[in-house]
Image (spheres, helix red, strand yellow):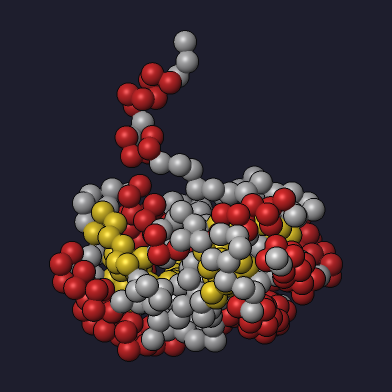
């Protein structure tokens, strides 16, 4: 007897139908450009300091209550305006769940331009909300009239706006965001996962609006393994969302490492600046390949459409056999046909990628 029959009768139908969030297995000798990780490891000196801090933690105890000092350190490091409150998450993925859980009764609507971050849709549905994705234009830009019409029609509790957007890289104009904030009947979550590469933020204007929170993560700036995200907003909003947070959601090892790393925020900034500077040369070199269209990106990645000798699937596979991993979005959404999302890597990784693509596109 196997569990299959009991599973079929017990697990939610939509979960049975769902495929698990794809996480590529780590392999030591691949060039990993599929997940917007920072290619630069922390320097040895800092790793030693983290090791010491971690060694001093009490693993037999639960994490203490909210640490005001750590909150102050995060607020200072990331320019959170005074008067705003913070909520920490085990990655911003967890914060997305908390937002949906705090705001949406079953059947309430979560809305986002689409394609955007897949986890907006997944988290909404897992938490029994209804997800509405408003298609981008054919040029993969925000369709403001469509957004406003959808907001009027669906009256969403939550609107998620990834700025810059993942996977397209676009940074929607301020006036359009303002119009969405003004029209939204509920809360607008500005997801600034890629803000360090954009040089633009809603954080300073956070408290100018009654219905805006800003969500960030350290995953894209060199600390993806730490699992730490934060939500900044008016204290009254944060107090409500905090009610659904699992107690002790930020473990003591993460807290200890974070305290050390944030003292060296300049190092993280320098790495982000390097990736940002390397983005345009990479984008231009990709765009120079026959049949390749590159979309403007303000993130640490570029989205490219391959319609030359090889299509998106073929390029993805050919790169994989050369041990270069990029994200294949060809079948993720009709607007993304033949699109691959490529993280900006270290210089030698970008060079290897371009060499492989040139070889693939040569007649
Ligand atoms: C990567 C990403 C996140 C998730 O960040 P974690 O903190 O690693 O969970 C959130 N939003 C967007 C738009 C992302 O691309």
Residue at 48% x, 43% y: name it. Answer: 20
Q: Where is residue 60 in the image (x, y as percent from the top left)?
A: 64, 45
Work out whether residue 237 can be spotted. no
Q: In which quarter of the image is residue 209?
A: bottom left
Does 344 appear above or below 207? above
Q: Please tell me which residue lies in front, 198 or 135.
A: 135
Q: Position of residue 318 (x, y in %)?
A: 68, 54
Residue at 45% x, 63% y: name it. Answer: 336
| Label tally | 0
Extreme residue toward the top, this view? 1
Residue 349 placement, left or right of 61: right
Q: Please tell me which residue lies in front, 177 or 45.
A: 177
Residue at 60% x, 78% y: name it. Answer: 287
Does 40 appear above or below 283? above
Residue 270 placement, left or right of 19: right
Residue 85 placement, left or right of 339: left
The image quadrant where one finds the C terminus is bottom right
Extreme residue toward the front, this view? 363
Q: Position of residue 314 (x, y in %)?
A: 60, 54
Residue 309 placement, left or right of 186: right
Residue at 45% x, 19% y: name it. Answer: 3
Work out whether residue 33 can be spotted. yes
Does 163 appear above or below 47? below
Q: Quadrant of residue 335?
A: bottom left
């Amino acid at each position: 007897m196997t569990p299959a029959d009991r599973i079929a009768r017990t697990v939610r139908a939509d979960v049975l139908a769902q495929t698990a969030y794809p996480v590529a297995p780590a392999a030591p000798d691949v060039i990993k450009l599929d997940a917007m990780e920072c290619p630069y490891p922390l320097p040895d000196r800092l790793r030693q300091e983290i090791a010491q801090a971690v060694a001093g933690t009490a693993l037999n105890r639960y994490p203490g209550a909210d640490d005001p000092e750590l909150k102050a350190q995060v607020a200072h490091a990331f320019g959170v305006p005074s008067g705003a409150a913070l909520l920490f998450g085990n990655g911003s993925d967890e914060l997305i769940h908390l937002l949906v859980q705090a705001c949406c009764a079953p059947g309430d609507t979560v809305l986002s331009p689409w394609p955007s971050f897949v986890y907006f849709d997944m988290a909404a549905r897992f938490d029994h909300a209804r997800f509405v994705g408003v298609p981008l234009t054919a040029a993969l830009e925000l369709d403001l009239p469509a957004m406003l019409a959808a907001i009027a029609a669906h009256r969403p509790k939550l609107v998620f706006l990834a700025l810059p957007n993942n996977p397209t890289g676009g940074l929607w104009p301020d006036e359009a965001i303002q119009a969405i904030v003004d029209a939204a009947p509920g809360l607008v979550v500005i997801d600034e996962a890629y803000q360090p590469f954009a040089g633009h933020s809603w954080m300073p204007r956070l408290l100018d609006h009654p219905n805006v929170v800003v969500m960030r993560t350290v995953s894209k700036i060199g600390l993806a393994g730490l699992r730490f995200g934060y939500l900044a907003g008016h204290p009254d909003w944060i107090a409500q969302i905090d009610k659904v947070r699992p107690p002790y959601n930020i473990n003591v090892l993460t807290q200890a490492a974070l305290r050390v790393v944030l003292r060296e925020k300049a190092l993280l900034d320098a790495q982000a600046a390097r990736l940002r500077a390397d983005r345009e040369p990479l984008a231009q070199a990709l765009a120079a390949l026959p049949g390749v269209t590159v979309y403007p990106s303000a993130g640490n990645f570029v989205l490219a459409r391959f319609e030359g000798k090889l299509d998106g699937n073929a390029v993805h596979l050919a790169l994989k056999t050369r041990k270069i991993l990029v994200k294949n979005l060809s079948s993720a959404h009709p607007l993304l046909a033949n699109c691959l999302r490529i993280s900006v890597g270290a210089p030698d990784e970008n060079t290897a990628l371009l060499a492989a693509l040139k070889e693939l596109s040569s007649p």
